[in-house]
Image: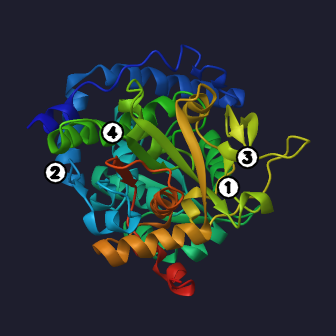
C-alpha cells in the first residue's frame, strides 16, 4: 500500500533544471525557431499536469493496471555466489517484468496522456533497440492515436522482432537510411516530421536527453523506478543499498533509478556505458567516459565528437546504448562527482547476460547486461566490499537479443 502511494504521489520536485532548462551548464534548447512554440506548449502543459492530482491518479492507475507496477525488487543469490565476496547481497529491480518488457513504458504512458491533454491526435517517436517504439505503439493503441516510429535501418535489421511487434500494434515503422542508420539519425528524422506537423503531432522523445523540457519530463516519469526501489529495499534490508548500478545510453533508466537517491551520499551510483570493442579502439559508445561537452539533439551535454566538433560514429552490441550523446542531468552529475561512470565491452555484456541467465533463469536485455557484467568484474578486481548490498537496474528483457546472443555463445 505504501508503494501504491509513492507511485501515485506528486512527481519529484527539484531545484534543477532551472528556468532555462539547465542542469548547471548542461541542457537548454538548441532548436530551430519553428520548434520553440511546441516546446513551450509542452513545458506549460507539463507544469500544470505535474501539479494536477487527477493527472497523477490517472497515470498511477494505468501504471498499476496496464503496466504492472510496482515491479519486483528481489535477491538473486545464485548470481551473488559468482561474485565470491563474503556477505554480498544482489537485488534486481525488474523493469523487464513490465508490460512491453522494459522501463520505456513508464515514460511513453505519461507522455501519451500529456499529448491527449494538448489535443494531439498523432504521435511520432524514435527508437534504437525498439523497446521505446514498442512502448509508444502500445500506448497509442491504448489511447486511440496514430503512431509513426522512426528507426535506423541498421537497428531494424538487428531488432527485427521489435519491428514486428510495433507493426502488429498498428504503428508505421519508417526506416532511416541516412548516416550510420542508427538512433541518432532516427532522432533527426523525427524532428523533421515534427516541424512539419506541429498542430496534430506530439514527439514522444524516449530518453532523458534532448531540448528542455524533455530531460525533466522523462526523468520525472522514470523516477517511479527509484521511488519503488527505495521503499522495497528498506522493507527487505532495513537500510539503503551501498551500490545502485544501471546501464547508460541516453540515460532514462539510470536517472530514473538514481534520482531518488541523489541526496544519499552513502549510496554509490554507478552508470555503466557501452565500451563496444574497447574504449581504446575508438569503436564504442562511452559518451561520458570518453566524450566532451557539446551541442547535439537540441541540448548541451557530453557527446562523442572529433576535434572539429563533428559527431563520431558509435558501436555497441546493444542497440539501445548505441548513441553518441547522453542526457544533461547525467552530464551534470558526472561533473559534480555524484555519479561514477564505468564501461563494459560487448564481451563483458555477453558474459553478464549468460551469467544471469544460467544462475537465475532471467534473460536480461543486452543493455542491462552491461551493468550485470560490470558487477562481475568489480567483484573480481576485489573492489566490492564484503556485506555490500547491490541493486542492479534490469531495464529490459532479452528476447529481442536472442539472435545476437546465439551468434556469440558463452565462453
Question: Who is closer to the viewer here, 5 or 267?
Answer: 267
Pointer 1 local density, CA inside 10 Å: few below 14, some 14–19, many at least 20: many
Pointer 3 local density, CA inside 10 Å: few below 14, some 14–19, many at least 20: some
Per the image, label 1 sits on a secondary structure element best described as loop
Image x and y of residue 216, in percent: 47, 29
**Front: mark 3 or 2:** 3
- Choose the circle earlier in sequence order: 3 or 1: 1
Question: Who is closer to the viewer here, 30 or 93?
Answer: 93
Per the image, label 2 sits on a secondary structure element best described as helix
Q: In the rendered image, which residue does mark 4 sit on?
A: 226
Q: Decide: marks 2, 4 in contact (CB < 8 A)?
A: no
Question: Who is closer to the viewer here, 117 or 156?
Answer: 156
Q: In the rendered image, which residue does mark 3 sit on?
A: 290
Q: Residue at x 33, y 39 (%)?
A: 226
- Choose the circle earlier in sequence order: 1 or 4: 4
Taking the image as drawn, is residue 112 in sight? yes
Q: Which quadrant of the structure image shows residue 221?
A: top left
Pointer 4 local density, CA inside 10 Å: few below 14, some 14–19, many at least 20: many
- Choose the circle earlier in sequence order: 3 or 2: 2
Q: Residue at x 18, y 37 (%)?
A: 238
Alpha carbon distance from label 2 to label 1: 36 Å
Q: Decide: marks 3, 2 in contact (CB < 8 A)?
A: no
**Front: mark 3 or 1:** 3
Alpha carbon distance from label 3 to label 1: 9 Å
Image x and y of residue 140, in percent: 36, 53
Amino acid at each position: 500500500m505504501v508503494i501504491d502511494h509513492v507511485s501515485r504521489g506528486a512527481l519529484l520536485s527539484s531545484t534543477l533544471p532551472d528556468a532555462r532548462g539547465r542542469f548547471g551548464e548542461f541542457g537548454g534548447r538548441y532548436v530551430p525557431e519553428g520548434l520553440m512554440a511546441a516546446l513551450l506548449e509542452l513545458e506549460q502543459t507539463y507544469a500544470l499536469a505535474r501539479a494536477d492530482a487527477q493527472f497523477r491518479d490517472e497515470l498511477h492507475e494505468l501504471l498499476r493496471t496496464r503496466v504492472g507496477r510496482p515491479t519486483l525488487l528481489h535477491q538473486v543469490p545464485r548470481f551473488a555466489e559468482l561474485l565470491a565476496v563474503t556477505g554480498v547481497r544482489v537485488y534486481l529491480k525488474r523493469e523487464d517484468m513490465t508490460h512491453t518488457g522494459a522501463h520505456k513504458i513508464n515514460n511513453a504512458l505519461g507522455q501519451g496522456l500529456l499529448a491527449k491533454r494538448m489535443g494531439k491526435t498523432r504521435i511520432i517517436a524514435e527508437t534504437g533497440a525498439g523497446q521505446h517504439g514498442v512502448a509508444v505503439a502500445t500506448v497509442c493503441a491504448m489511447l486511440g492515436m496514430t503512431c509513426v516510429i522512426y528507426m535506423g535501418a541498421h537497428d531494424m535489421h538487428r531488432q527485427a522482432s521489435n519491428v514486428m511487434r510495433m507493426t502488429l500494434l498498428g504503428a508505421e515503422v519508417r526506416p532511416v537510411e541516412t548516416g550510420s542508420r542508427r538512433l541518432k539519425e532516427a532522432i533527426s528524422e523525427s524532428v523533421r516530421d515534427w516541424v512539419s506537423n506541429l498542430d496534430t503531432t506530439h514527439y514522444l522523445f524516449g530518453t532523458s536527453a534532448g531540448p528542455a523540457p524533455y530531460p525533466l519530463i522523462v526523468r520525472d516519469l522514470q523516477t517511479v523506478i527509484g521511488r519503488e526501489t527505495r521503499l522495497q529495499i528498506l522493507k527487505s534490508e532495513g537500510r539503503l543499498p551501498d551500490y545502485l548500478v544501471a546501464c547508460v545510453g541516453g540515460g532514462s533508466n539510470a536517472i530514473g533509478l538514481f534520482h531518488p537517491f541523489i541526496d544519499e551520499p552513502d549510496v554509490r551510483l554507478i552508470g555503466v556505458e557501452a565500451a563496444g570493442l574497447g574504449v581504446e579502439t575508438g569503436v564504442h559508445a562511452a559518451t561520458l567516459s570518453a566524450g566532451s561537452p557539446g551541442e547535439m539533439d537540441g541540448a548541451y551535454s557530453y557527446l562523442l565528437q572529433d576535434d572539429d566538433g563533428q559527431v563520431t560514429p558509435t558501436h555497441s552490441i546493444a542497440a539501445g546504448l548505441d548513441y553518441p550523446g547522453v542526457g544533461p542531468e547525467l552530464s551534470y552529475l558526472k561533473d559534480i562527482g555524484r555519479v561514477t561512470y564505468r564501461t563494459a565491452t560487448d564481451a563483458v555484456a555477453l558474459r553478464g547476460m549468460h551469467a544471469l541467465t544460467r544462475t537465475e533463469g532471467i534473460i536480461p536485455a543486452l543493455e542491462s547486461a552491461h551493468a550485470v557484467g560490470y558487477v562481475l568484474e568489480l567483484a573480481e578486481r576485489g573492489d566490492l566490499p564484503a556485506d555490500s548490498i547491490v541493486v542492479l537496474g534490469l531495464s529490459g528483457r532479452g528476447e529481442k537479443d536472442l539472435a545476437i546472443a546465439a551468434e556469440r555463445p558463452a565462453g
